[in-house]
Image: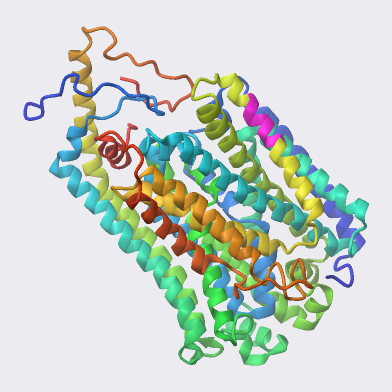
């Protein structure tokens, strides 16, 4: 990537609990990365507030406004029981929206950034292969089976 | 507690044979699939290339304990609407896993939660790992004791109040199985039990729920009508407030419980550990989705079972057998399908206890071995063989600790112990996870304060609540030092945990993390490192 020259040795490797290479911090300045972060975070917070907050609201309503919840709808079904069933429906819809959102908005961005990251790491490794000790951090056995480049 | 044996001898024998068969089969499978070489990742994570359905079943198995099968259905049978709300909370809590926790944790994690936090706070990871281990150990022990005490309570359904010897024998046998599965089988062994249990749970609950509905000609209204009629409280059965109504403190207590369930179930250590098992995040997403469906279906079925128990047997019969209502499902099974169905469901209940206990022991053992021993005591220089030995030994130690505590506290209320575990998870573990993943400034000081503070806050509030003293049902009915009016500490301790995390970060004077750590963590969390 010409507009993002890989940096040299300004980041000494520090002891790290995870074995694979740490990504360069450059990728986090990328505008695509920011839109990825906000896309994921905004939807996650909204959906969580909707499902967990909606349920807690339902509990509060049942405790403190029983008159509303006890209105009969049909037969023995009251508003409260119907809303309780509605929680299952809300949950299903939220899960479906989550998957659709992740598939259409989040995954393509993440894929693009990941290939950029791999490219940068590969070129950085090629560049610093000459000085000894620059790379070749040994992969501890038994860590995740990620590609070790 | 219980006046008479609920179930006849024939189902006891059948249950015994069935349970033994299942245990022998799963134990052999677990030993066959156990890690052959000294590979620590296999012990912690098991088979990492399982299909989403199998992973989802294992997650569902980890997540749903015997409290759902026996406790919640009993609650529905006795209190109707309030019990149904409790089941709803169990279902909604899994959504937290799907929406917030699963994928970020999976991308940044390795073996334990400590690894994720250490990636975010590398410089001061050791004290944080110790704090995490303490919290995980507290939660796992409480919940493990709840499961073992539950096995005694289940035995009571058959034999009446068991003698001291029978009780000890029951706890020791179940506890030994737990240690065998966890220490020898590791995660592959636990997975075998979980999948076995989850399949039996889903099939058993849905089949029995279908039978109940069939009994009412698939007319839910008839079921509700009949349940209200025989509940002894008429239409009030289908209205809120039968159990947690009346005073404001009762209502707040229920809200507190629901908060702890919705926020705490998602932060239980064995559930978090299971999330790290699949290798690819795509598989993880499908697995969690499968689990959403399975958990929802089981909770829905459990609601029908509870209503069916009241509708078919009547409240008086249920209460005269066991006033906590825990025997409702078994009595319903006896009414519908005779000894065979009773034996099947009892075996299922025992298997559920066993499987959840195995998951917990394994989670606590891996936290002790990986976080405490390998990363803190040996400072990351332990070999895999060493760490594996420590993990197996700690599994045995935790199991024995659980057995001893369960023998001492055999009369304790299972639900109370479990609820306290949820409250600790929600007020100590969850703030740390949420801040680690989503808050830029979060520091090690904040992590320590929220972990220890959340743990202490929930335990102290529980100690000064009516659970421990002042009411006839508490541990010390004669003493009275209960100045905290609620039975569930969640409503205070969860905000306290989050607040302490913020406070600790703001006031943190310790060495800062290297610049760029947060960025690297974020890239890893969002972009990931796999395929």
Location of residue B514 by image quarter: top left
Q: Nearer the viewer, residue B215 or A65?
A: A65
Residue B152 at what x, y percent from top left?
81, 57
- Tell me the quadrant of the picture where the C terminus of chain B can be found: top left
Please state if B381 lies on the left or on the right of B156 as rendered: left
Residue B47 at what x, y percent from top left?
54, 32
What residue do we see at 43% from left, 50% from top?
B432
Q: Is residue B512 above or below residue B100?
A: above
Location of residue A50 by image quarter: bottom left
Q: Nearer the viewer, residue B311 or B35?
A: B35
What residue do we see at 46% from left, 82% from top?
A61
Count of number-bearing discs? 0
Q: Nearer the viewer, residue A53 or A119?
A: A53
Residue B160 at what x, y percent from top left?
89, 65
- Tell me the quadrant of the picture where the N terminus of chain B can be found: bottom right
The region drawn magenta spans B389-396
The verdict on residue B377 being magenta is no
Q: Is residue B352 above or below residue B254?
A: above
- Main SS class of the magenta portion in the image: helix
């Amino acid at each position: 990537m010409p507009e993002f020259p890989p940096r040299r040795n300004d980041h000494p490797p520090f002891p790290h609990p995870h074995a694979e290479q740490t990504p360069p911090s450059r990728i986090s300045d990328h505008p695509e990365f920011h839109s990825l972060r906000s896309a994921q975070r905004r939807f996650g917070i909204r959906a969580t507030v909707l499902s967990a907050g909606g349920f807690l609201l339902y509990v509060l309503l049942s405790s403190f406004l029983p008159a509303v919840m006890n209105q009969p709808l049909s037969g023995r079904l009251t508003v409260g029981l119907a809303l309780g069933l509605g929680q299952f429906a809300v949950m299903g819809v939220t899960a479906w929206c989550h998957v659709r959102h992740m598939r259409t908005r989040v995954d393509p961005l993440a894929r693009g950034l990941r290939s950029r990251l791999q490219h940068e790491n590969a070129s950085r490794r090629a560049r610093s292969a000459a000085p000894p000790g620059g790379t070749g951090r040994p992969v501890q056995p038994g860590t995740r089976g990620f590609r070790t480049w | 507690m219980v006046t008479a044996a609920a179930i006849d001898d024939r189902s006891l024998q059948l249950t015994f044979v069935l349970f033994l068969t299942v245990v022998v089969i799963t134990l052999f499978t677990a030993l066959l699939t156990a890690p052959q070489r000294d590979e620590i990742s296999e012990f912690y994570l098991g088979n990492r290339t399982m299909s989403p359905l199998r992973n989802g079943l294992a997650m569902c198995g980890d997540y749903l304990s015997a409290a759902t099968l026996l406790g919640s259905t009993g609650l529905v049978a006795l209190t109707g609407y309030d019990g149904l709300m409790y089941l709803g909370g169990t279902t909604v809590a899994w959504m937290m896993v799907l929406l917030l926790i699963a994928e970020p944790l999976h991308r940044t994690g390795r073996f334990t939660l400590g690894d994720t936090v250490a990636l975010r706070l590398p410089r001061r990871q050791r004290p944080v790992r110790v704090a995490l281990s303490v919290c995980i150990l507290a939660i796992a022990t409480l919940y493990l004791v709840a499961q073992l005490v539950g096995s005694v309570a289940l035995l009571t359904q058959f034999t009446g109040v068991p003698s001291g010897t029978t009780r000890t024998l029951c706890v020791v046998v179940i506890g030994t199985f737990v240690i065998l599965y966890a220490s020898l089988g590791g995660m592959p062994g636990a997975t075998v039990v979980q999948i076995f249990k989850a399949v039996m749970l889903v099939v058993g609950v849905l089949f029995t729920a279908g039978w109940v509905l069939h009994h009412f000609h698939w007319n839910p209204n008839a079921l509700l009508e009949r349940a209200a009629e025989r509940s002894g409280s008429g239409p009030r059965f289908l209205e809120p407030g039968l159990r947690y109504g009346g005073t404001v403190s009762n209502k707040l207590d229920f809200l507190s419980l629901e908060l702890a369930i919705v926020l705490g179930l998602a932060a239980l250590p064995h559930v978090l550990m299971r999330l790290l098992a699949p290798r690819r995040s795509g598989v993880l997403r499908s697995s969690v989705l499968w689990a959403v469906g399975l958990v929802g279906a089981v909770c829905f079925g459990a609601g029908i079972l509870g209503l069916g128990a009241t509708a078919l047997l009547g409240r008086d019969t249920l209460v005269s057998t066991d006033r906590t209502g825990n025997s409702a499902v078994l009595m319903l099974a006896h009414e519908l399908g005779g000894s065979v169905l009773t034996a099947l469901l009892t075996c299922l209940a025992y298997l559920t206890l066993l499987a959840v206990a195995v998951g917990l022991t394994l989670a606590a053992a891996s936290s002790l071995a990986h976080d405490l021993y390998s990363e803190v005591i040996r400072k990351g220089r332990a070999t895999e063989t060493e760490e594996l030995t420590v993990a197996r030994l700690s599994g045995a130690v935790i199991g024995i600790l659980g057995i001893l505590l369960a023998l001492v506290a055999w009369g304790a209320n299972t639900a109370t112990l479990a609820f306290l575990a949820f409250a600790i998870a929600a007020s100590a573990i969850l703030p740390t996870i949420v801040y680690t993943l989503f808050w830029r400034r979060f520091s090690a000081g904040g992590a320590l304060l929220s972990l220890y503070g959340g743990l202490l806050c929930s335990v102290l509030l529980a100690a000064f609540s009516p659970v421990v003293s002042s009411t006839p049902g508490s541990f010390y009915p004669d003493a009275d030092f209960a100045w905290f009016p609620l039975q569930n500490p969640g409503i205070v301790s969860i905000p306290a945990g989050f607040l302490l995390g913020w406070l600790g970060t703001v006031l943190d004077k310790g060495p800062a993390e290297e610049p760029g750590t947060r960025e690297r963590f974020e890239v890893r969390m969002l972009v990931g490192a796999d395929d």
